[in-house]
Amino acid sequence: MKSEEQFLELIDTYFPRDHEFLKLGRGDDCAVLRGGKDYCVSSDIFLEDVHFRRTYFTAEDIGYKALAVNLSDIAAMGAKPVAFTMDLMAPADLDEEFWNGFFKSMSMLARQSDIALAGGDLSRADKLCVSITIYGVAGGSGEFITRGNCAPGDTLFTIGDLGLARAGFHTLEAFGEKGREVFPAAVRAHLRPKPKILIGTLLNAAGVKSLMDVSDGLARDLPRLLGPELGADLTIPASDLNGNVLAFSLGVGTDPVETAILGGEDYALLGAASPEILDKVSSVPGFTAVGTVTETPGLIVNGSPFETEGFDHFDS
Amino acid sequence: MKSEEQFLELIDTYFPRDHEFLKLGRGDDCAVLRGGKDYCVSSDIFLEDVHFRRTYFTAEDIGYKALAVNLSDIAAMGAKPVAFTMDLMAPADLDEEFWNGFFKSMSMLARQSDIALAGGDLSRADKLCVSITIYGVAGGSGEFITRGNCAPGDTLFTIGDLGLARAGFHTLEAFGEKGREVFPAAVRAHLRPKPKILIGTLLNAAGVKSLMDVSDGLARDLPRLLGPELGADLTIPASDLNGNVLAFSLGVGTDPVETAILGGEDYALLGAASPEILDKVSSVPGFTAVGTVTETPGLIVNGSPFETEGFDHFDS
């Protein structure tokens, strides 16, 4: 990739400029999102050697996951994504084959999600970094689902595997590419997390008022859902966890429930359902009850207080 | 700065969460921009050793300019900024004093521009990088000003100095901190470019239909304003240029008009005015006529064809 123009031409081959929610597509000083609806917005950094490694992520994996983690934030609002902007920092050693793989898988996910690339910026950099901002609109109800809004007695639930992506991450760190054969489901959960957009809109339609996505591990994220006044009593039987989480935990000698609760980057949805809507909510595919909201702050897991915290992006 | 929590607390001391255009402020999976209006959006990368150096940018300069370059894109739409999201990649060696300076000057500019920080993401990184996405709304007319919309005979105009920031950049590269004393105006133009938001809205009210900001130099940006079918006949007398551009060009032995036309990062506004609105437009403060739109593609500068192109972000 020699010039900026060539780069922009390549982007044009993969991403259409038009979308019903775009009054003006990319190519000007700004894009314009059509008015009328509230827009939810979220940004995520996807940085080489912090969030991924080029040694075991393919170009396709990187392009896919950079967008998927942003889509997950839209899913966590019970919303429908419409567009994204992308700031792309590109090392000079990446060739056209890399970028074709990167844009191909990103654009496939964009097409599946029916979203347009509305603009962005390009720069040379030492490390590959994708900084995406994504825009979504609410579904039928017109409401977004926020965090909070929990009450004692509400059922806490997750949709998506806990700890599986973390097991995949450690497997890839230990075995590199070969890790794909060791724990395929876990590795796939780390490389290709599935944004749960349809699930999010179903939860919204079912009346859920409290939802987030689990990106830093359940132990760290659940208090963010509950707020400082409430706690949770969780029941997470090891037998309910993915077989790869059990096998990985056995291999490294940790408690599989701890793996599940500390695991980051799950991109599972975590929510609370009041008794009145529980019937409806529990029929959403993948619904797994994991416990109950309590009046006392703190987490109880399988009968014992749970103290350790999840992942801190700034821990060194 | 030890933890992510500390970092977020520091951000909270500088940036309020509320804004009339924010239905939901930062702290959830997404922020929510209140519906009703079209939103223009733009993203810019501001990366250490590509867009700035820590050797001669203070923390305050970096925080200021990272936001200013984004505000300039909103100005170029003739729009009013309302909010921004920020992805911040932070090296571990930057201490609390640095971040206080960085956020203090960024938040001062945000307050002056009446915009809220709506959200973002944080990550450790080797190099400091600020990736901001900014949101704006149209003023009274309800219209944004795009590129294009030029016709032969329209007057081309700029508002803001050409080449001054480029002279400042080279001065700082050559003299470091000391450069501030050599060419103060030029250095200030590079470190602290003034986003021309009020000017943009005045141009919008005066009926301007074609506008952009000059970030890659007039020679490269003007064809983007004109589109492939049109050209320009420019008259840029050296005597009209800033004294620092003249002195710098004399010092390095280049033509000052070339310095002005090739200079990047001016964040001047560049637009076209049809004869009917020229009177109104020319009364906007800082208005400088630089030439006329022509039917033949290509640039004529002071009577001669101008060939050299401006800055390519990917040239190595």
Image (cartoon, coloured by chain):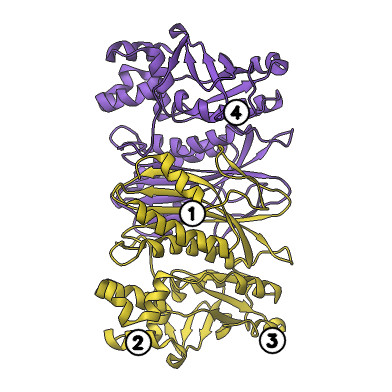
Chain colours: A yellow, B purple
Residue type at the position of mark 4: Leu
For marks 3 and 1, give the CA distance. 36 Å
Task: Tell which subunit mark 1 falls on.
Answer: A
Residue position for label 3: A279
Position of residue B69 measured from the top left corner of the image (x, y, whole percent): 48, 35
CB within 8 Å, label 2 to label 4: no
- The answer to which image quadrant residue B278 occupies is top right
**Is residue B193 depicted above or below A284 in this figure?**
above
Q: Residue A255 carries which label?
A: 2
Q: Which of marks 1 and 4 is in front?
A: 4
CB within 8 Å, label 2 to label 1: no
Residue position for label 1: A132
Position of residue B186 measured from the top left corner of the image (x, y, whole percent): 39, 20
Q: Which of marks 3 and 1 is nearer the N terminus?
A: 1
For marks 4 and 3, give the CA distance. 56 Å
Residue position for label 4: B211
Q: Residues within 10 Å of mark 2 (few under 14, many from 20)?
A: some
Q: Is residue B1 left or right of residue B200?
A: left
